[in-house]
Amino acid sequence: MCHAHRVTSESALPSESNAACDVTALATVVAAQRAELDRLRNAAAMAAVLERAKGAIMALTGCSADAAHEELVRRAKDSGRTLVEQCWITLGGLAPRALRDPVATGRGEPAEPGATPAVPTPRGEGPADRHDASVLARIAQALVHVRDPQELAHCLREHLAGSVRADAVLLFAGGPAGGLELIGHAGVTETLATQWRHVPPLSGVAALDTIRTRQPCWLTDFERDSERYVLIGTPPDRWLSRAWLPVITGDAVAALGILRTTGDPFPSATRELLLEVARLCAGRLHTFLPSPVQVADRLAEVVQSVFEALPGPAILLTPLRSDTGLIEDYRIDAAAPYAVDAAGRHGRALVGLRILECYPTVVGEPLWEGYRHTLTTGEPYEGEPFEYQEVVAGVPETTTYSVRAAKLGDALVVTWIRHDRADRQERRTADAQRLGNLGWADWNLVTGEANWSPQAFAVLARDARRGPLPLHELPARVVPEDRPALSRAIEGLLDGGPPVDTPFRLGTSAGTRHLRLVAEAVNDADGRPLEVHGFLQDLTAQRSAELALVESERAVVTQHGALLAERTLADRLQHALLPLPRRAQQLAGLRVDVAYLPAQSGIHVGGDWFSAIELPDGSALFVVGDVAGHGIDAVATMAQLRFTAKGMVITGSSLTGALTRLNALLLHTHDTNATATLVLARYEPERRRLVWAQAGHPPPLLLRAGGTRYLRRPKGMLLGAKAAPSYAEAEFHVEPGDRLLFYTDGLFERPSEGFDKGLDRLAEAALHLGTEDPGVLNPLLNTMLEGERRDDVCVVAIHLPPEPA
């Protein structure tokens, strides 16, 4: 018997009471099943954490699974922790001891460097201890379901908000270059989180100090702390007290930040609680943070991508240390393309090699000690130029270098400059000539000797083995039309004249080259020329571009004239084939208003058209069509369809039969594969019946009794798209006062909106359409056609006047 509801009225039916009982019982069963499912999920998650912790102890001690479980239980009992807490602490670092700073360290001061952190004593049974134990137990259970650092931050804020008044929680991990990466946050805005997402390795950042020293930092004096640290917050005084705690996960260290809006100090019990929380989090963060090897690999990848764009030599060196910590060698983890070793290997071929493999004689040099000093202090090393002997092609060569080294994370970025001034200057000159496609040339007029750069031979398409040309023979090599001008320029130089800048053309097997000679003469005290020097430049690409531009401009002018003439012809043809009525027409008892507006953009005439005629039997035929394309072809197709459609209907063809024949006409008699949309409507005044069919055309819009709606389109594909399409007719009864709009897509289509949105806009604008006024369609056109028209617009409006009252 159900006692969930007491019967208070005799009118209640027994079936209703039984149904309520069934629902209540079902809800109870569902709630119990959900609770049991949650319990099983928690148990499975807890079991997974326990198994991982047992596996860690088994790997360290070599004991059995049962012994590992007993060890975890013993540790939890001795320290006053729950079993799941002990599991997380075991997974956190396996070896690291708990961090605890004495209260005597003071506010804002980390523990003494090098001091051994104390292990927290087991929690007692006082009220505060029981409260802390319950908080830690809840956090340990919640960590089972945490999937990433972001969820961890929200979990900690939720459980610490009441016990330590934590208003915000931040989690920072060490970045690959020695900075910080924000991996989780709760209680701060996304804008603030974005600003502190990446923190460079700067001084005065409390979280970075905590990671470096592995000691907690308590900040409770805002004025003093703001002078020492760069404080997080907008504004920073929103958080008046902060705690930064190291979360040590094996070799990696993260920083857990607790931000509070109150400026009260952190009592001893609160500090103990937060340090225990940091130890718990280490086990969960261990699965989220990358290992030092992964961080180093990511750093190497980033540095290599930067090195690829460097114009000079550079390498990334990772120190290789002995068991005692001494640097024995360096491994090259990234190398720029211009980095070359003594064996001739360069770029990526150096990656993975030891520095002593590539530069074996650097041991004992001052730069070796400079590397060590930079790694220890972080100060960049810039050594004095030194001589380095290397063997090139079996011959010992001594080269002078200047080396610079800078610390990047736990690695070094090393760059160097080679001090061979003549070689470097020659290389730069050769690069400039190659990029500018020019070469220098000297002619000694006294000795008759000539000296050209290699690029000068390339410009003149001359084999360097044949030697330079004498200056007076240069005009004989150019095209005949340019010889007189070049000869006069050279004669002027030989007579001691001013510098020359002369263009000329040279015929080669690859075609004509456009060249330029810029030269001047060096005269003696009497004004007689002793030497001519200058440069030869290849301007073929530039000249070809100029000629192509001129030709393009001519083609554009010619094409514009042709298109303008085509538009004029098409426009005249369209007006001749499609005369517009100057006023409304009366057909079969209907008032018919027509509007046609050509496109404003472009120089083409479109193929929109209409027909509105009264047939011999007293009915009226209305046709609106749109031919794809513009110009003469579109106008010709429009005329063909317009007259053929009228002729077919007048001679007794049905509307669907006319569409089928028009489709065949476009497929078999037109050379341009044109397509068109079309709507045909026949109105019978006696029955007020409108029969219509369409071929891919927008539906007519009905205005009736102050509202609008589109008629449902019968089946029909656009003309010219398929060999055997299927068309259907639809019937509509016209009532007095109705108005129907037939139109082409230029009335409503816009590039910035969809098809349906344009139709909605048309339906709304048509609500304000007038009745019998002259130019009745003008307000509709003004509303729909704001801005430039890119397509023709054709509208046919039919109106059945209301019957007299």
Image: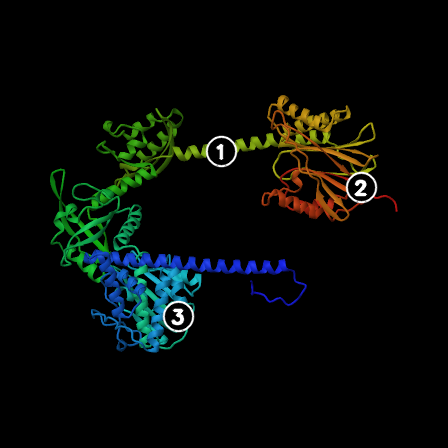
The residue singled out by tag 3 in the image is: 166
In the rendered image, which quarter contains the N terminus? bottom right
SS at circle 3: loop
Percent x, y of residue 59: 21, 55
Q: Earlier in the sequence, mark 3 or mark 2?
A: 3
Q: Amino acid at mark 3?
A: Ala
Q: Nearer the viewer, residue 505 or 320?
A: 320
Q: Nearer the viewer, residue 584 or 260?
A: 260
Percent x, y of residue 246: 29, 66
Q: Quadrant of residue 76?
A: bottom left
Q: Earlier in the sequence, mark 1 or mark 3?
A: 3
In the picture, the disc for residue 735 is 2
The residue singled out by tag 1 in the image is: 550
| Mark 3 Cα-neighbour bin, 10 Å: few <14, some 14–19, many ≥20 | many
Percent x, y of residue 165: 40, 72
CA gap between label 3 and label 2 equals 74 Å
Q: Amino acid at mark 2?
A: Glu
The vertical placement of 52 against 725, above or below, is below
SS at circle 2: loop
